[in-house]
Amino acid sequence: MNRSPKTYRVKSFGCQMNVYDGERMAELLDAQGLTATDGDDADLVVLNTCHIREKAAEKVYSDIGRLRRDDGSRPLVAVAGCVAQAEGAEIHRRTKDVDIVVGPQAYHRLPELVADAAQGRRVADTDMPADSKFDALPKRARQVRPSAFLTVQEGCDKFCTYCVVPYTRGAEVSRPWAAIVDEAKALVDAGAREITLLGQNVNAWSDGGRGLHDLIEELAKLPALARIRYTTSHPNDMADGLIAAHRDIDKLMPFLHLPVQSGSDRILKAMNRSHTSESYLRILDKVRAARPDIAISGDYIVGFPGETDEDFEATLEIVRRIGHSMAFSFKYSPRPGTPAATMPDQIAPEVMDERLQRLQALIVEQQLAFNRRTVGARTSVLLERPGRHPGQLIGKSPWLQSIVVDEGAVGDLLDVDIVAAGPNSLTGVLTRKQAA
Ligand code: 5AD
Ligand code: SF4
């Protein structure tokens, strides 16, 4: 049997690093002569999966089922990403409808795996090779979107007790300085105006004594690069140099995603977060002293094992003290193999639901308040994609707000006046030059 695919589709779920990995897989397949397609008729479908919470992981199996066509046939199916890493060949035992299982550190081998699968073999590769996949990936594509992702660091050594990342992505590894600078140049040459540096602990990036702020300073020298962002950061790696970069480097956007997870020190300890609510707030004080207008984003988990009403109140309290521009909140989801999964006092689903609702209501209130404060401001917007209505475009402000405008083209960096705000998007009007 030979089912060599001619067309492919990569579907990425979960975090921005998966988006990056999905793009790299697409570039690999392009280099093999395959053609990308958005339709349901692709010969090869890559599901680039997320394992962070149970819902995301279970979704994979229903997605696989849905790839069957009306005539009973199906495409070649590859499961990539963190579910592939966590479950490995177990996926082949659970379903006959998958040909390839490939982990996040092994996807540079996708072409060989596809060739094997085309011969009818069911294959799995979840190695975490010492030599980096990055060296084996092709040079960046010729065309990229105005806002591009660039992975600089992967993996995590922090072992928060709820989290699968240290197991699915492996130990903390920083990519070398020169490789990152080269890739950034290639992205800018290909049309990127903004680069977001990615890492599970991006602010722990280092190479030969140089830290993330040195890298940002270097990238800021690229003339055609207008904006730099980075995500996700851990409070304990928020070095003074990086904080100072928010004051000193104009191209570094005034936005910081710095998860605290809970406001209760007792829960933070049980989570193995190795910071307290106060130490977190002290870091924010320094960040805000360096860059007063900085927007703060975060992640929260409600219903961690043992979380009492009082612990949850402490979370609401820290949210009030922080004042987020946006934040993400999740119900705790026990992940196989993590210490928290077997902790006593797991929280009832109804309690989690109620806490999540209260927390999300508070966050939406803060988002709206933040957005309203920017009404009347004149600011830059990088247009990223067409909007819902003809002629409309959606872009991002420096504070990562979604701004809808009626003029311009994707890739434009425009000055706008913000004229209206909702909790999730704002309206901008192109700034007209005043007659002298
Ligand atoms: N349950 C719920 N949320 C989780 N996160 C990580 N692991 C879990 C889990 N087991 C959340 C954290 C993290 C974000 C990416 O996902 O808040 O910051
Ligand atoms: Fe997971 Fe904690 Fe590492 Fe973030 S810092 S990836 S939450 S273990």
Image (tube, helix red, strand yellow):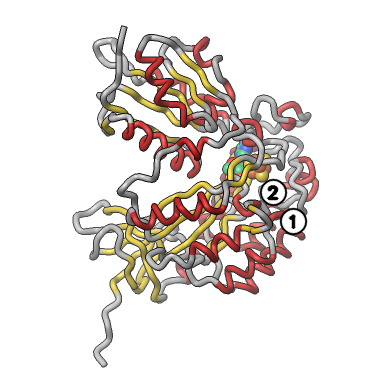
Mark pair 2, 1: CA separation: 8 Å
Q: Which residue is mark 1?
A: 277
Q: For this view, does 172 lie left or right of residue 105?
A: right
Q: In the rendering, at what x and y percent does residue 8 appear?
A: 31, 28
Q: Which residue is the extreme one toward the left?
A: 390
Q: Which residue is mark 2?
A: 262
Residue at image point 60% right, 51% down: 202
Name the amino acid, label 1. Ser
Find numbered disc 1 in the image and state the secondary structure of the residue it sits on. Answer: helix
Q: Residues within 10 Å of mark 2 (few under 14, many from 20)?
A: many
Against 65, is 415 above or below? below
In the rendered structure, are the residues bearing label 2 and label 1 in contact, judged by CB atoms less than 8 Å apart? yes
Against 28, is 180 above or below? below
Q: In the rendering, at what x and y percent does residue 232 appear?
A: 58, 50
Name the amino acid, label 2. Ser
Q: Nearer the viewer, residue 255 or 118?
A: 118
Quadrant of the frame with the C terminus: bottom left
Quadrant of the frame with the N terminus: top left
Q: In the rendering, at what x and y percent does residue 163 appear?
A: 66, 36
Q: Nearer the viewer, residue 429 or 49?
A: 49
Q: Which residue is the extreme one toward the top?
A: 1
Residue at image point 55% right, 48% down: 152
Q: Judge whether residue 129 can be spotted in this image.
A: yes
